[in-house]
Amino acid sequence: MRRRTIKADGPDPIDRYVGSRVRARRVGMRMSQTRLGDAIAVTFQQVQKYENGTNRIGASNLYKISKALGVGVSFFFEGIPEFDENGQTVNGSVNGTGLESDPMTSREAIELMHNYYRVKDDAVRKRLSQFVKTLARSFEAA
């Protein structure tokens, strides 16, 4: 069996992107790597490798992960940037996926979204969203 070797500059950017989406969803659900690993019959170390893109996620495991995290398989590919042959995003960003500077992949953003959706009342969530927009705009004007 032939194995893919990792390029000198690191994991494939698509594998890193998919892994970052797995991590974001898992953290947002407050699920440990161990619990996700148990759900798909792999070790937590394997989940770590999936999340950082070191190991590719096979189709069967991606399907199992999607079920364990309550999303469709397509969730992991939503918003994926277009990459050139060097693994750089077409819009010119460096470092593979450009995720290093994406605020939506931070633990703080993931926890904020998790807690936002824990608010059951739609009207309260809408008012909370409006409040945050107003607050952000007040800092733009300053």
Image: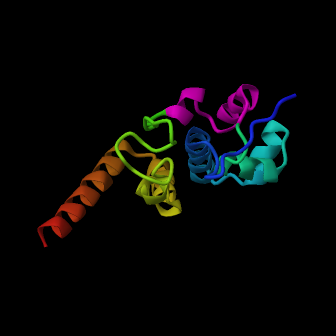
The reply, left or right, for residue 120 in relation to residue 37 is left
Q: Position of residue 45 (x, y in %)?
A: 80, 53
The magenta segment is: 57-77
Q: Residue at x 77, y 49 (%)?
A: 35
- Height in image: 61 above or below 46? above
Name the quadrant containing residue 59: top right
Q: Residue at x 85, y 39 (%)?
A: 41
Q: Nearer the viewer, residue 71 or 115?
A: 71
The reply, left or right, for residue 60 in relation to residue 80 is right
Q: Residue at x 75, y 26 (%)?
A: 60
Q: Residue at x 64, y 39 (%)?
A: 69
Q: Position of residue 131 (x, y in %)?
A: 25, 59
Locate the C terminus and report the quarter of the image it occupies: bottom left
Q: Residue furthest right?
A: 1
Prevailing SS of the magenta stretch? helix
Q: Position of residue 48 (x, y in %)?
A: 73, 52
Q: Residue furthest left?
A: 141
Q: Residue furthest bottom?
A: 142
